[in-house]
Image (tube, rainbow, N blue to C red):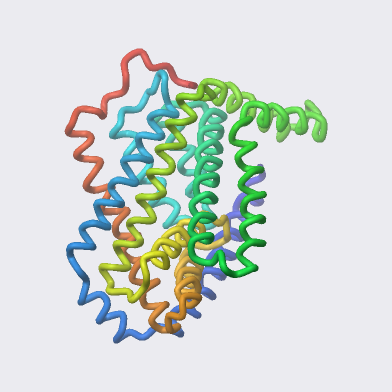
């Protein structure tokens, strides 16, 4: 790709991301009551804040174990390396615009886990498909529990269920899907096109990797770990609401906790979801009849705690895992798997 085109693309991505984040953040700040924010931050319940940090650590550990499973049977990265990649992935998603942190995660898989780039792409796609399936199930469950008496929720249920079924089908047949991508690229672009050759190479490497993790034991392990990680993520938000003295029912806190994860998974042009995530969470709280200023205050407090918590987890968990002797690569591990 031409360097001028790359530079223009980078400027476009950063420009649009900053504009979207700035607009959403401007609305959030315009509704913010600074005195209320100060009261919320100075009257934190330390017990629930500790539980929130423990839940965040649990989420990171489960996500790291999932990555370790997906790197089997010959992982070139130890458990501490998996913790490092998982934690840095979260930090990159916060710092970089338009979910470019996913590309940084691919580089981590390539350099630390020594996966070929195509295999790393397959790994990332499989993780995101697993996340989507689990998030859809959790969101459907909370919607049904909270709003089933409303007719509109039934329509929403069918929409999400249909999308979840499509994603689940892709999740179950990932190798075949990647092979189809290779064939389509060859038909559309021809064998001489550089883009086609690159996409086909990555798709075939990803397909080869994905066939190795298609055993039912691996699938069930990944699914169980994904459920556990997202439940821990939702529990983190629930504990934060309690820590910040939010006057919400349990089902409202759970639904808001799941909604935070869904909003964060939407690939929009923002800088780490800044502005959009706060506005989205505030909108969810406003749907529960929370006043706008109070909803914005709680949303900002929760988001700030989550961002700082990710950094704290990286600082806490990685040294512990490294000290336990898991940092050294497994002997006999071969790159490119």
Q: Is residue 280 visible?
A: yes
For residue 180, which quarter of the picture?
top right
For residue 298, which quarter of the picture?
bottom left
Q: Which residue: 67% across, 49% down? A: 162
Q: Which residue: 46% across, 56% down? A: 261
**Residue 286 drawn above or below residue 271:** below
Q: Where residue 59 appears, x then y in whole percent?
A: 34, 46
Q: Where residue 6 appears, x then y in whole percent?
A: 62, 49
Q: Where residue 113 appears, x then y in whole percent?
A: 40, 29
- Taking the view exactly as shown, the residue that stands out farthest to the front is 149
Tell which of 197 and 319 is nearer to you: 319
Q: Is residue 100 visible?
A: no
306 lies left or right of 319: right
Q: Which residue: 59% across, 58% down? A: 13
**Residue 313 drawn above or below residue 320:** below
Q: Quadrant of the N terminus?
A: top right
| Total tally of numbered discs in the picture | 0
Tell which of 15 and 274 is nearer to you: 274
Tell which of 315 and 295 is nearer to you: 295
Q: Where residue 179 appears, x then y in whole percent?
A: 69, 26
Q: Which residue: 56% across, 69% down? A: 20
189 lies left or right of 4: right
């Amino acid at each position: 790709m031409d360097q001028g085109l790359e530079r223009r693309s980078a400027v476009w991505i950063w420009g649009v991301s900053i504009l979207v984040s700035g607009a959403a953040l401007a609305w959030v700040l315009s509704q913010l009551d600074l005195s209320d924010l100060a009261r919320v931050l100075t009257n934190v319940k330390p017990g629930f804040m500790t539980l929130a940090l423990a839940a965040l650590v649990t989420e990171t550990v489960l996500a790291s174990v999932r990555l370790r499973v997906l790197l089997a049977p010959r992982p070139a990265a130890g458990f501490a390396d998996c913790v490092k990649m998982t934690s840095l992935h979260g930090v990159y998603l916060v710092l970089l615009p338009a979910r470019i942190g996913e590309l940084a995660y691919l580089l981590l898989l390539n350099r630390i886990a020594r996966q070929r780039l195509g295999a790393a792409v397959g790994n990332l796609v499989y993780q995101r498909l697993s996340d989507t399936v689990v998030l859809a199930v959790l969101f459907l469950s909370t919607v049904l529990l909270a709003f089933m008496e409303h007719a509109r929720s039934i329509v929403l249920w069918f929409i999400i269920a249909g999308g979840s079924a499509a994603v689940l089908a892709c999740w179950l047949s990932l190798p075949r899907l990647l092979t189809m991508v290779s064939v389509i690229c060859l038909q559309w672009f021809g064998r001489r096109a550089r883009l086609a050759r690159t996409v086909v190479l990555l798709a075939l490497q990803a397909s080869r990797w994905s066939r190795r993790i298609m055993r039912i034991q691996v699938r069930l392990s990944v699914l169980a770990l994904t459920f556990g990680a997202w439940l821990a993520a939702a529990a983190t938000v629930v504990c934060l609401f309690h820590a910040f003295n939010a006057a919400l029912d349990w089902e409202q806190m759970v639904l808001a906790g799941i909604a935070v994860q869904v909003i964060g998974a939407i690939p929009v042009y923002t800088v780490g979801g800044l502005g959009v995530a706060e506005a989205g969470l505030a909108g969810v709280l406003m749907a529960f009849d929370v006043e706008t200023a109070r909803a914005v205050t709680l949303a900002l407090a929760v988001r700030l705690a989550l961002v700082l918590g990710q950094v704290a987890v990286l600082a806490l968990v990685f040294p512990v895992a490294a000290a336990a002797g898991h940092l050294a690569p497994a002997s006999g591990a071969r790159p490119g798997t």
